[in-house]
Amino acid sequence: MVNLTIDDKQVTAPKTATIYEAAKLNGIKIPILCHDKKLKPFGACRMCLVEVEQMKGRQIPACTTPATEGMIIRTATPDIVKARKMVLELLLLNHPLDCPVCDKSGDCDLQNLTYEYKVNSNRFTDAKFNHQIDYNNPLIERDMNRCVLCGKCARICDEIVGFGALTFIDRGIETKIGCEFDDALNCEFCGSCISVCPVGSLLARPFKHKARFWAMTKHKSVCSYCGTGCNLTLGVKDNKVLTTIYDEDQGFHKGQLCVRGRFGYQFINSDKRLTKPLVRKNGALTESTWDEALELVAARLKGGSSVAALATPRLTNEELALFKKLLVENVGTKNFDHAAGYAHAALTEGFVRSFGTSASSASILDVQKSDLLLVIKTDTYETHPVVGFEINMAVKNKDVKISILSDKRGKLSKLPGANTLVHLPGNEVVILNAIAKTIIDEKLVDASVAGVTGYADLEKMLSAYSADAVASQCGLTAADIKKMASDYATAEKALIIFPVGQAYPGHNADLASAAANLAILTGKYGKEGCGVLCLSEKNNSQGAVDMGFYAQDGGFNAAQILDACSTGAVKTLFIAGENPLVSYPDRKKVKAALDAVEFMVVSELFLTETAAMADVVLPVCSFAEKEGTFTSTDRRVQYIKPAIRAIGQTRTDFKVFADLISKLGGTAPVTAAAQFEEIAATTAGYKALSHVSLRKDGAYAPATASPALVAVQAVPVPAAETGKLSLVVGSVLYHSGTLSQNGEGPMHVCPEGYIELSRPDASASKIAENDIITVSTTNGSMQLKAKVTSRMPAGVVFAPYHFSDAPINTVWNGAAVTSVTLAK
Amino acid sequence: MNPITPIINGMKITLKHMFMKPVTLQYPTERPKVSQRFRGLHGLKVSHSKAKCVACYLCPTVCPAKCITVEAGEDANHDKFASVYEIDMLRCIFCGYCVEACPVDALKMTGEFELANYNRQDFIYSKERLLEK
Ligand code: SF4
Ligand code: SF4
Ligand code: SF4
Ligand code: SF4
Ligand code: SF4
Ligand code: FES
C-alpha cells in the first residue's frame, strides 16, 4: 500500500494502482475518455490530467501514472479545468456534433464531459471530418467522423477478443481507425468495440434509432445461449427487449459478450413467437385455449411408464426440477432425458466415475490463473467464445502456455506460442491415453496418486498406448505427443478444457475420464489454476445435470425413448423446448419415432420442425419473461427475473408443469423461489443458496472431488475409406443449438449451413467456394454450400449442426467421425 | 352622498358602453386574431419538402404530459427521420416545452385552437396532420 494525498484528502492505495485508480478507490472522480479498466493503460486523450506537487505542478495523465508514496495530487485546480476544456474544444473541433441523430446521445462520454465542463463555444475553427461511413455489414456501423481516437476499440479487439480487426491508420490529423487495407469491417462481430467506444463512432445497427438510452429500463439477466453464463443487461422499452447494454461491472467477464449474447436477443420479441396454444384437430394444428390444451395433455399423461419426456437444458433449474417431479411423482415414469442423451455423459458418467461428482473440477476463473492450458478441440472458442476471451487474455497477458489437441485448426491455434497438434479425427482418447502413458513412463506422476484407486489397472491398460505405438494411427509423431505430455506434467499449474454438446458425440464419458486421468496422475486438480473444465453446451446444461434430469435407475435415455416411440412402448412424448428433428443425430430415425408416437406435446417458443409434428403445442416464455436460476458450466448459480411481461398468452414452463401437477392431483410449489428451496435442500452444493442470496451476483455451488483413475479403452475409429472424407460436425461461433436461428445478429453473419473443406480436397474435387455440393453418407445425402478454408486438414470436412434448412443429421447418424463423399 | 348619484354614475357607464366597439366576438362568424406567441396545435416544419424533424426523441422526453410518440427510421441515405410522429391532443397541456427542446427547430405551435372532435381517436394527430401545410 502507498499513502498519498489527493485533493487534500489522505488516502491509501495498492502499490500497483495508477493515480486514477487510487482516486477512484477513494471516491474521487477524475474524468476519463480513453481509459478502460479492462485494458492496458494507454494515455491517448489527456482528459485525466492532474497536478502533482512533487512534479513542480506539471500536468500529468492520471490513468497512466503510478501512484507513489507521498504524492500530493490535485485533480481540479482552475488550471486543470482550463486544460480539460481545451482538450474538449480540440476534440469537438472536427467532430460533427450531430447528437440529435447520433445513437450514442445520452450515453456519450464526450457529450457528458462537454456538458460537465460547459464547453459551449469553440475558440478554434477547422473543417469537419468527411470520412466515409462503413455500412457494409448489418451489425456494426462505423462512423469515423465521430471518433476521438481513444483506441479502445482497437485495443479491446486485440487484447481481449484477440481478433485484431481494427487499428490506427494514417498519421496526424488524417489518423483514423480502420480495418485492413482500409476496407469494410469483417470480423467475428462480438460487438466488444461498440461497447467500449466512448462516442457514437461504433454503433449496433440492429438497435439503431430504436430508442434513446434514457428511455429504456435496464434489466440484469443471464445470457440464454451457452454454458459460459455471461451476465447481460437487457434494454427494455414498451415490453420489448431492444438491445443488450454494456455494463463493465457485470460478471467475471466484466460485461464482455460474444456475438450471440450481444446480437442474438431478437428471438425474445420475434413476430414468429407462438402466442396461443395449438391443438391438432382433423390433422391440422389449430388455435385453442390453455384449458383445452392442458386438459388434453393431463389426460394423456396418465400413462405411467408409457410416458416419456425430453427437455431442453435452456429451462431454469426450478422448471427442470418441477418437470422431474411431475414425471416421477405424478405421472410415474423414469423416462426422461435432455441434450440427446449423450451430451451430458462427460459429466454424468465420466466425471462421476473419475471425480465422484457430476461437475467440473475447475472454474472459468482458473483459466487466467493457470500456467498451461490443454485445450481439446479449437472448437472451444466457437462453443464458448467468452471463455475463449479468457484464454486469449491468459496467453497474451499472463504468459500462460497453451497446448491444443484438435482435428482442425481454429482461432485458438493462432495465439502466440500455441502448440497445436492436428490429429486424425476421433482419436482424442487414444492421444490422451498416450499422454498418460508418457507421464507414467517418464516418471512424471505426482506423489498424490498413491492414495487413488485404479492406478494398477490404468497402468496395465496403458501398456497398449505408448506414444510410439499410437502416433501414426493418430496422424502425429511420437515426439509431439511426448512433448505435450511433458509440457503438461511439468507445468506448475495446468488446466484441461474441452467442450461438450450435441454436436460432439466423441466428447463423451471416456474422453472426460481420459482427461481426468491426466489431472489425477499429475495431481493437477482441486488447486487454483488446475483441474478439468468441461464446457457444457447450453446455458443451463450443468443445471439439468444437477437437477438430475437424465435417465437414471433404469429409465430410458433419449435414444431409448425415441426407439420406444417407434416400437410403441412409449405412447405419450412430452418435449419441452428440444428440437430433436434438427439437433439429434439421424433425422430419419427421429422422424420415424415422432411419427410413430401416439401423442406428442411440445412446449416451445416457436413452431419448430418438431413442434409442427405435435398433437398439442404449448406456447411458453423465453428467459426474459421468467424468474428462476441458471447454473453455468462451472456451477455458478445465477438468478434471473422477468425483464418483460409474457408475450401473448404464453406461460412459463414452470406454470405449465405446476398446472399439470395439480390436474394430476398433486400439489406444486407456487413460486420459483419455493421450488428453489426444495432444490437447495436436496442438491449437493446448493445448500447455502436461495433466490434472495443469488439476486445480486449469483454464487458458486461447490463440488468436492474424490478422484479415481479409470482405465478407458479408446473406441477405434474406422479409417476413412479411399476416396471418402471424414466428416466432423460441430458448433459455429455465431450459433448455439437451434435457438440462435431466431437471433437476427447470428443469422446476419452466418445465415445457413455449409460444409467446410481443405484447399487440397477442394482442388482435388474441383470444388470452389460457395459451390453447392452433394454430401452423401450411408445415411442419406443432402446439398450444402462449400466453404474452402486453410484451417481444415486434408481429408477432413466440417459441418455445423444448427440449421433447420440444412439439417446435417440427414447425413450424420451420431458418430464422432462419419465417412462422406462430396460431389458437385 | 345623494342617493341618486351612484345611479347616475352607473347609467353613465352604461351609456358610454352603448356607443363603444363591442368586446364579444360573434364566433364562429367572427374569428379572433391570435397573438404570435399563442400556443395552439403543433406544426412540424418542412424544409426541402421534407419534415425537418430528425427524430431525436427530445420532445417526447421533455413532454410533461407524455403525449408525444416518436419512432425513428433510417432512409435510403442512412439519414434519420421520424417514421412515426404523433401527439395526443387530449393529453397535451400546451406548455410548449417540446418546441423549446427541439434542437433543429423542427416544431412550432400554431394559432390553431379549434381542436374539438367527435372521437377520442381523432385527437391523436399523426405526422401527416401535423406537417405544416
Ligand atoms: S458522439 Fe456524442 S457528442 Fe458526438 S454526436 Fe454522438 S452523442 Fe453527440
Ligand atoms: S466486433 Fe469484436 S471482433 Fe469485430 S472489430 Fe469489434 S471487437 Fe473486434
Ligand atoms: S471508434 Fe470509438 S473506441 Fe475506437 S478509437 Fe474511435 S472513439 Fe475510440
Ligand atoms: S453465448 Fe455464451 S459466451 Fe456468448 S454471451 Fe452468451 S453465455 Fe457468453
Ligand atoms: S425535438 Fe424536434 S427533432 Fe427531436 S423529435 Fe421532437 S420534433 Fe423531432
Ligand atoms: S483517460 Fe487518461 S489519457 Fe485518456
Image (cartoon, coloured by chain):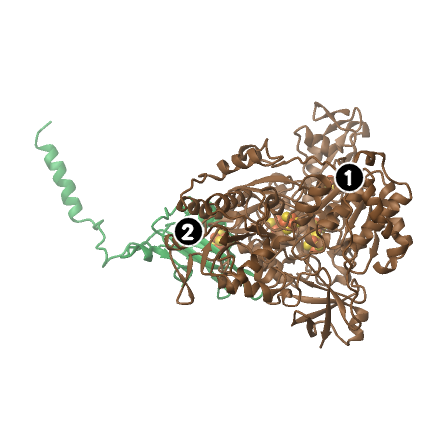
Q: Amino acid at mark 2?
A: Ala
The image shows residue A231, relative to residue A129, as above or below, that is: above
**Where's residue A571, x and y in %?**
48, 58
| Vertical comparison of A129 with A329: above or below | below
Mark 2 secondary-structure assignment = helix
Looking at the picture, does residue A196 appear above or below residue A189?
Answer: above
Residue A345 location (% of width, % of height): 67, 49
Q: Which chain is brown?
A: A
Q: Colour of chain B?
A: green
Q: Position of residue B38 (x, y in %)?
A: 37, 50
Q: Quick one: A120 or A258, which is closer to the camera? A: A258
Tell me the tag on residue A530: 1
- State which image quarter holds ligand 6: top right
Q: First in sequence, mark 1 or 2: give its number.
A: 2
The residue tagged 2 is A298
Quadrant where the N terminus of chain A sits is top right
